[in-house]
Image (cartoon, grey):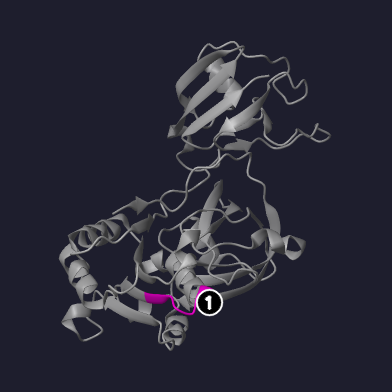
């Protein structure tokens, strides 16, 4: 049995955003909305695979931040994200209470590798577990599976506190008209009226559900999305079953980018590997609120640089691994070749950064 992550680390330069106009904002529940975006000429850039997400650069009242949300539209359609309000003052509240039709948001293209392409090579039984807003990646997977092959079968177990909290309630009901999709709601308040679908999910219950609703005549693959406690319980139940079921987990906590002005970023660090003159050097805890050059200065490393303002280009280096975030661009600055950065202008934005000087 194997567990996979929602996305694998990839080499990336400073995140590039596209302006997207908010075409529609539709309320799903009292504390969640469906936001439709129009990227105009960049629409092709937003074609996506099931379970992928896009990242917004948002200007909140007290800071600028990056936040990622799953795409829930069919690939090729206008990008849509569903956002549930979970805390006050954050990005989710911004989407629910502030964002309006006509607003223009800066958005990065889709990324993530939650759904293996190999699944669509033959018929599968996809078993989806979601809790709360964890429905968004698996909702995308369910819609894709029904379109990808006429012999895929999907079983969705969706946990919520009550019927009022069910996101995409109408859409899931319509999807369930297909003979190849079954949807089972599990409500904490006992709203279904059945013991089997009331209360909290635990490992023993998951194992029983697998024995009851599994399809042993098809290869099975499971996806889990929701709070960590929920995912841990489902994972223990899958391990407890009488057969081996491969699965992947999706965690909203693993945001792909961190903005240098976001709350708490001054407490974050990265492992910074610098290769210069054939000599590798390591800064174990490079602060993410400093540029790469500033972190090297702080660590006492001698780095090639004259101006520290993006003009001389002596600190130009190849970004071998990791993500960085740019300082505001200077007017008239030179454009670097793809894969190259100025260390005086870039801040770490991933756990590990590797840069190599020519």
Q: Residues within 10 Å of mark 1 (few under 14, many from 20)?
A: few
Tell me the residue that label 1 is attached to.
Answer: 147
Does 58 lie within the magenta span?
no
| Quarter occupied by the N terminus | bottom left
Percent x, y of residue 120: 48, 67
Percent x, y of residue 11: 57, 39
| Quarter occupied by the C terminus | top right
Question: Image quarter for residue 125?
Answer: bottom left
Residue 166 seen by the camera: no
Q: Is residue 350 above or below residue 271?
A: below
SS of the residue under disc 1: helix
Residue 19 seen by the camera: yes
Q: Residue at x 47, y 46 (%)?
A: 8
Q: Residue at x 58, y 21 (%)?
A: 294
Looking at the rendering, the stretch of residues picked out in magenta corresponds to 147-154
The answer to whether residue 18 is left or right of residue 286 is: right
Percent x, y of residue 300: 52, 11
Percent x, y of residue 314: 72, 18
The answer to whether residue 165 is left or right of residue 90 is: left
Q: Is residue 12 above or below residue 311?
A: below
Does 149 lie within the magenta span?
yes
Taking depth in this image into account, of 272 and 181 the one nearest to the observer is: 181
Question: Image quarter for residue 295?
Answer: top right
Q: Residue at x 65, y 61 (%)?
A: 46
Taking depth in this image into account, of 45 and 155 the one nearest to the observer is: 155
Q: Is residue 111 above or below residue 78?
A: above
């Amino acid at each position: 049995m194997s567990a996979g992550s929602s996305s694998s680390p990839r080499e990336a330069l400073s995140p590039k955003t596209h302006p997207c106009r908010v075409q529609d904002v539709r309320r799903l529940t009292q504390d969640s909305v469906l936001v439709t975006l129009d990227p105009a000429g960049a629409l092709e850039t937003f074609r996506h695979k099931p379970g992928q997400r896009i990242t917004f650069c948002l200007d909140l009242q007290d800071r600028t931040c990056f936040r990622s949300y799953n795409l829930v539209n069919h690939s090729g359609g206008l990008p849509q994200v569903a956002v549930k309000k979970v805390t006050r003052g954050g990005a989710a509240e911004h989407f629910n209470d502030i964002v309006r039709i006509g607003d223009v948001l800066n958005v990065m293209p889709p990324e993530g590798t939650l759904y293996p392409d190999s699944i669509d090579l033959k018929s599968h039984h996809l078993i989806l577990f979601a809790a709360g807003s964890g429905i968004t990646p698996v909702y995308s997977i369910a819609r894709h599976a029904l379109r990808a092959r006429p012999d895929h079968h999907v079983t969705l177990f969706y946990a919520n506190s009550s019927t009022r909290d069910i996101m995409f309630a109408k859409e899931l009901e319509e999807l369930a008209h297909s003979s190849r999709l079954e949807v089972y709601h599990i409500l904490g308040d006992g709203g279904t009226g059945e013991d089997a679908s009331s209360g909290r999910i635990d490992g023993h219950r998951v194992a029983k559900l697998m024995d009851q609703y599994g399809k042993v005549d098809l290869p099975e693959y499971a996806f889990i999305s929701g709070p960590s406690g929920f995912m841990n319980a489902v994972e223990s139940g899958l391990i407890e079953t009488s057969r081996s079921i491969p699965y992947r987990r999706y965690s909203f906590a693993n945001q792909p980018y961190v903005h240098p002005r976001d709350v708490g970023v001054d407490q974050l660090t990265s492992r910074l590997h610098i290769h210069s003159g054939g000599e590798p050097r390591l800064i174990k805890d490079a602060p993410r609120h400093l540029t790469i050059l500033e972190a090297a200065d702080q660590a006492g490393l001698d780095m090639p640089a004259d101006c520290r303002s993006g003009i001389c280009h002596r600190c130009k280096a190849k970004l071998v691994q990791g993500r960085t975030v740019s300082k505001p661009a200077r007017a008239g600055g030179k454009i670097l070749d793809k894969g190259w950065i100025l260390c005086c202008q870039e801040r770490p934005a991933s756990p590990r950064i590797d840069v190599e000087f020519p």
